[in-house]
Image (cartoon, rainbow, N blue to C red):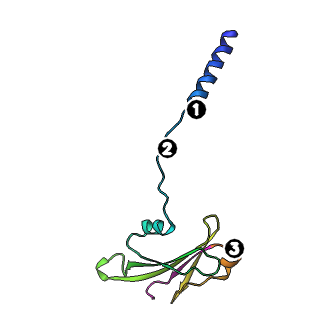
Amino acid sequence: MKFYKSLILFFVISFSVIGCRVVKLEPIEILTFQQKLENLFPNAEITKIEAKDYFTKAFQLIINEPLDHNNISAGTFKHYVYISHYDVKKPTILVAEGYSAYPRTYELSKILKGNQIQVEYRFYG
């Protein structure tokens, strides 16, 4: 019985020592919000714009999209997207703007104090 207690104590101490060793972590590259957008949309024109109301940052994205995904040679159009950011812990409201998008704050975004993404309808702008 004494042997088993000693064996268990040995394992507990061994695992404690192994668990307490120092591990060198690789440095983490911290990206800005704009750099994250640039990584997500490498071919888009990304412009920082004035943040309105409670938003901390705002950006206009102009994404060149094909007119016909089955026929790339048909040409492209500019798709306008406006991103207004407040906090990563807040909800994100997606607004399908319509014919002519421009950056403004919608009622639901104000009520929830959330982030907002406005996307213009296709072929307009």
Q: Position of residue 95 (x, y in %)?
A: 58, 79
Residue 60 painted magenta: no
Asked if residue 19 shows in the view, the reply is: yes
Q: Give amino acid for label 2.
A: Leu
Residue receiving disc 1: 19
The outermost residue toward the top is 2
Q: Give amino acid for label 1.
A: Gly
Residue receiving disc 3: 112
Of residue 51 and residue 45, the one placed in the foreground of this image is: 51
Per the model, the C-alpha gap separating discs 2 and 1 is 15 Å
Q: Which residues are magenta?
A: 115-125
Mark 2 or 3: the one toward you: 2
Q: Residues within 10 Å of mark 1 (few under 14, many from 20)?
A: few
Of residue 34 and residue 92, the one placed in the foreground of this image is: 34
Q: Are marks 2 and 3 in contact (CB under 8 Å)?
A: no
Q: Residues within 10 Å of mark 2 (few under 14, many from 20)?
A: few
Classify residue 22 as left or right of residue 91.
Answer: left
Q: Position of residue 93 (x, y in %)?
A: 61, 74
Look at the numbered disc 1 and give the secondary structure of its residue: helix
Residue receiving disc 2: 25
Q: Quadrant of the N terminus?
A: top right
Which residue is drawn at the image coordinates 62% and 67% (left, top)?
A: 87
Q: Quadrant of the C terminus?
A: bottom left
